[in-house]
Image (spheres, helix red, strand yellow):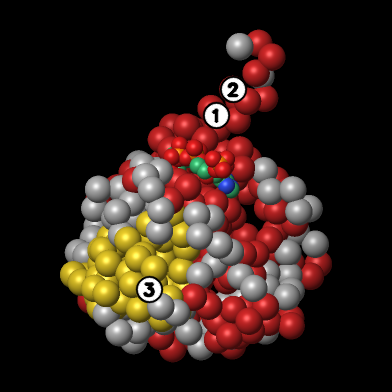
Amino acid sequence: MNDFQKELVAALRKFCRENIEPHMEHDDHEGKFRMEIFQGLGEYGVAGVTLPTEFGGAGLTYSDYCLILEEIAKYSVPYAVTVSVSGMVQTIIKEFGNKKQQEKFLPKLTSGEEIGAFALSESHSGSDAASLKTTARKTEGGYLLNGTKMWITSGGIAKTYIVMARTGGEGAKGVSAFIVRDGDKGFTFGKAEKKMGWKTSPTRELVFENCFVPDENLLLAEGKGFSVAMGGLDRGRVAIAAIGVGCAQRALDESIKYALTRQQFKQPIFNFQGLQFMLSDMATETEASRLLVQAAARSIDNDATDSKLCSMAKLKATDTAMAVTTDAVQVLGGVGYTSEYPVERFMRDAKVLQIVEGTNQIQRVVIARHLRKENEQHA
Ligand code: CAA
C-alpha cells in the first residue's frame, strides 16, 4: 500500500468500527439493512470510488477500490457487497452509457444517495446466462419488459437496475441491457429470499409485467446486452474477490487473537504446532489472494482488463475466504460455532462469494477458454 492508501484505509477502518461493527450481530440476526450505513459510506466517498469526479465519483483507481472493499468486508461482507454491486452498475453506465444516461443516473449512485442493482439471472438461466427469457418487445418510444429476475442483490432497496432482456433471437446476440428505475410502471418486487448468510443484504425477485422502458434507457444498442453484462462482471468479479480477501483477513485476525489468549494444557493454544501450521496456511492463502486481486485490479487501471486474471482472482480469493473462515471456526472450537464471536457469520457470508457473479466453476470455464485461446497453435 502507498501512503495515500494507508491513510484511506485507516480512516475507513475507524468509520467501520464506529458505524458498522456495533450493529452487525444484531442486524445479522434480524436481517436488517440500514440505509444510513450505506449513505454514511457514501458521505465518506466510497460509494463511487472509481468514477470520475465529473460524475461525483472519487476518481480513484480500481486498486484503491479493492483495498476499500477489503476493509469494509472485514466488518461486514453484506455492506461491502452492496457497495460493490452498486459500483458495478456505475461502471456499466460509465463504460457503456451515453452522456445523457451518465448525467442522469450516475450522480445519485456515486454520492451513495441511491443504490444500484444488476439483474441478469433468472430461475432457468443462472450459469447459462445467455439463455435468459425475459423479453423486451419494441413498442412506440421504447420497450415493454416481461419476465422475472431471480436472486437480485439489493432488490427492493436499489433505485436503479441494469436489466438484461431479450430483444432478438436465441443466445447472447439477442440480449439487450436496459436501465430500469424502481417505481417504473409494471415493475414490482417478488419474494425476498431467506438465506444462509448475507442477511443484512436483501436478495429479491424482480417482476416485469408490461413494464415500459423508454428508448433512451437502452444501453449501447440492441443485441449488445450480453457484452455489457460480461464487461461489467469482469470488474465486478475482482470486487467480489477483494471482499473475499477482507472476509478471510477478519477470520484470520480473530483466529490469531483467540489462539494467543486461549489457554489449554497450561499455555496459549498458539504454542501448538498443529495450530501454527493452520494459521500460517490461512495467512499465506489470504496474502496470495490479495496479490492476485491487486494484479487483476492493475489490469483494469491500465485499461487492459484481463478477464482471465479477473476470474482467477475471484476463484482464488473466494475459495480462500471459504477455507479460511471454516478453519477459523475450527481454531475457535465450541465458541467459534456460536454468535459470541463473529467467525461463524463470516463463514456463512463467505459461502455465497463462491456462487455470485459466476460460480467458481464458471470462473474455471472462463480461465480454461483463455488457456485454449492462448495456445491455439497447439490445437
Ligand atoms: N467481455 C465482453 N464481452 C464478452 C465477455 C467479456 N468478458 N465474455 C464474453 N463476451 C461476449 C463474447 O465476445 C460473445 O460475443 P461475440 O459472439 O460477439 O464474440 C458473447 O459475449 C457470448 O460469449 P460466449 O460465447 O462466451 O457466451 P456463453 O453463452 O458461452 O457464456 C459464460 C459464457 C462465461 C458461461 C457466461 O454465461 C457467464 O459468465 N455465466 C455466469 C453468469 C454470471 O456470472 N452471473 C452472475 C449474476 S450477477 C450477480 O451474481 C451479481 C450479484 O448479485 C452479486
The answer to whether 141 is drawn above or below residue 226 in the figure is below
Picture coordinates of residue 106 (x, y %)?
59, 80
* The quarter of the displayed image where residue 71 is located: bottom right
How far is mark 2 from mark 3, CA to CA?
A: 42 Å
- Outermost residue toward the front in this view: 140
Category of crowding for the residue at label 3, using alpha-carbon neighbours closer than 10 angstroms: few (below 14), some (14–19), many (at least 20): few
Q: Is residue 300 visible?
A: yes
Looking at the image, which residue is at 80% across and 62% down? Answer: 2
Q: Which mark is residue 169?
A: none
Residue at which label 2 appears: 372
Q: Nearer the viewer, residue 181 or 61?
A: 181
Looking at the image, which residue is at 58% across and 53% down? Answer: 231
SS of the residue under disc 1: helix
Picture coordinates of residue 321 (x, y %)?
45, 47
Q: Which mark is residue 369?
A: 1
Mark 1 CB lies closer than 8 A to ligand 1:
yes
SS of the residue under disc 3: strand
Q: Amino acid at mark 2?
A: Arg
* Mark 1 vs 3, N-terminal side: 3
Q: Amino acid at mark 1?
A: Arg
Looking at the image, which residue is at 33% across and 72% down? Answer: 144
**Which of the two marks, 2 or 3, is nearer to us in this view?**
3
Q: Amino acid at mark 3?
A: Thr
In what quadrant of the picture does the C terminus appear? top right
State yes or no: discs 2 and 1 in contact (Cβ < 8 Å): yes
Looking at the image, which residue is at 43% across and 32% down? Answer: 274
SS of the residue under disc 2: helix
* The quarter of the displayed image where residue 340 is located: bottom left
Residue at which label 3 appears: 139
* The quarter of the displayed image where residue 41 is located: bottom right
